[in-house]
Amino acid sequence: MKSENSQNEQYFTLHITDGLLYDSLYRYSQEYSIPIEKFTTLALQHFVNDIELFRSLRTGGKGYL
């Protein structure tokens, strides 16, 4: 899987041990015609953004929005 940030590109391997999760990622990537690597990167970015939002709300910040 390729991870991109604003400075450079970094490559790493993601081992998905949950077959149902892999099936969902694959199915949705096919549905939206996005390579599974890109779809997984977008899903992880969304997940991290959600974590940052909840952490910010817990500390009294305005959140990620």
Image: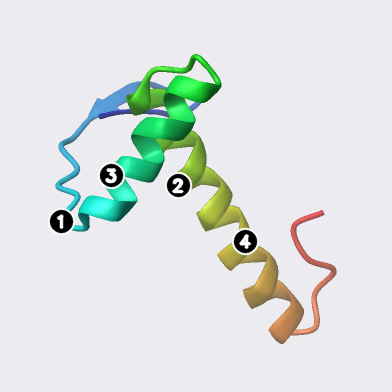
Q: Earlier in the sequence, mark 4 or mark 3?
A: 3
> Which residue matches tag 3?
22
Rendered-image quadrant of the N terminus? top left
> Which residue matches tag 4?
50
Q: Are marks 3 and 2 in contact (CB under 8 Å)?
A: no
Q: Earlier in the sequence, mark 1 or mark 3?
A: 1
User: In the depicted view, which residue is nearer to us: 12 or 15?
Assistant: 15
Q: Are marks 4 and 3 in contact (CB under 8 Å)?
A: no
* Secondary element at image label 3: helix
> Which residue matches tag 1?
17
Amino acid on which the number 3 mark rests in the picture = Tyr
Amino acid on which the number 2 mark rests in the picture = Leu
Residue at the image point whose x is 27% and y is 28% from the top? 10
Q: Earlier in the sequence, mark 1 or mark 4?
A: 1
Compute the Cα span from label 4 to label 2: 10 Å
In the image, taking residue 15 as reference, residue 38 lies left or right, namely right
> Which residue matches tag 2?
44
